[in-house]
Amino acid sequence: MTEDAAPLALYTDPEGADVSPAAELLRRHGFEVRVEHAHSPDELVELARRLAPAALLVTYARVGEAVLAAAPSVRIVACCSVGFDHVDLEAARRHGVWVTNVPDAATEEVAVTAFAMALSLVRHLPFLDRHVRKGGWDYQATGWPLRPSDATLGIVGMGRIGRRLATIAGSVFGEVIGCDPLVGSDAWPAGVRRVALGECLRSSRVLSLHAPLSAETARLIDADAIELMPHGAYLVNVSRGGLVDERALIDALDRGRLAGAALDVTDPEPPASDSPLRSHPRVLLTPHTAWISRRADEAYLMRQAENVVALWRERRPLTPVAEPQGGAR
């Protein structure tokens, strides 16, 4: 690429999304745009080396040391998601690369899905549905559902989505409590009691996870954490599958220690065809769809592109999660 050539914005794995409006935004601001479909880390390394992109616009592709070393031209890795655990932030900082996410495109969708999942669990809707589809018609077949106003909803992670869930759920559940050491008192929602993680686990009949996945939060809900939860509690996870030790979860469901789980995310995704999560009678499982709506899809793609444009125009992206260490490339 010559010095005066248009910078290349490379879509690495758009997963069938219509990127044309966002791509047009990039072109209007002087970028060449290329859409590829990297199916493996090696393919992405080869693409980066061969095309020398200035910006990587990623969906699920993993971007680490090998990719960044192969393409010293890259100045930004723009994620099309709230989560950014598929990007090695330390490697990006070392290589002088910005990393961005899209924190607010689907706040409503994800919060409402978590709320719907929580209500479905406590009212036994997925369990009763299975019972009827197998030919049954016994309203006591799955035990006693809960009255939501008798239950405490605990939220782990009080970012945008956790706060929105708290607002929605406040008039339905008996109490809403929250745990997040990183959210200041000025952003803490009214009516939500702030507690430490241990108390959140012990007090929540329904626990909803909204924390990012990191080295500190990986397997946050493990066997020890589950033992702290009330007997017969329910777990909702619409954040990242890696927050939960799935073996410990299945064991707790098999023993009746937990009464049910609703999962929109797993680790890995998709789960293996013989994974117990696919067949367990006390698991409500959806294919990472909590974020989906036409409006959200458009917003994710546009903000992803806007982060790239902002870096070139303002020398800083709109929603960075990692800044270059010692100066950008």
Image (cartoon, rainbow, N blue to C red):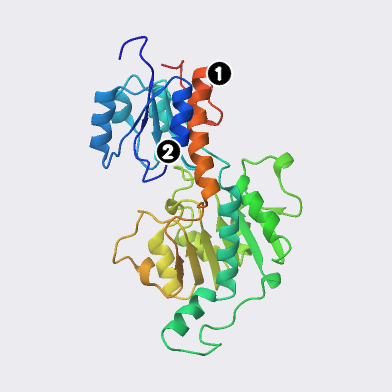
Q: Secondary structure at mark 1?
A: helix
The reply to whether residue 274 is visible in this rendering is: yes
Q: Residue at 55% across / 63% down in the picture?
A: 228
Q: Secondary structure at mark 2?
A: loop
Residue at 53% in and 61% down: 236
**Which quadrant is home to the N terminus?**
top left
Q: Which residue is mark 2?
A: 19
Which residue is denoted by mark 1 in the rendering? 314
Quarter holding the C terminus is top left
Mark 2 touches mark 1? (CB < 8 Å): no
Q: Residue furthest right?
A: 190
Q: Residue 306, percent across and down?
A: 52, 29
Up the image or down, 247 lies above or below 216; here it is: below
Q: Is residue 15 left or right of residue 192?
A: left
Image coordinates of residue 47 in percent, x first then y, are 26, 30
Q: Whole-percent x and y of residue 133?
A: 43, 82
Judge whether 52 appears above or below 283 on screen: above
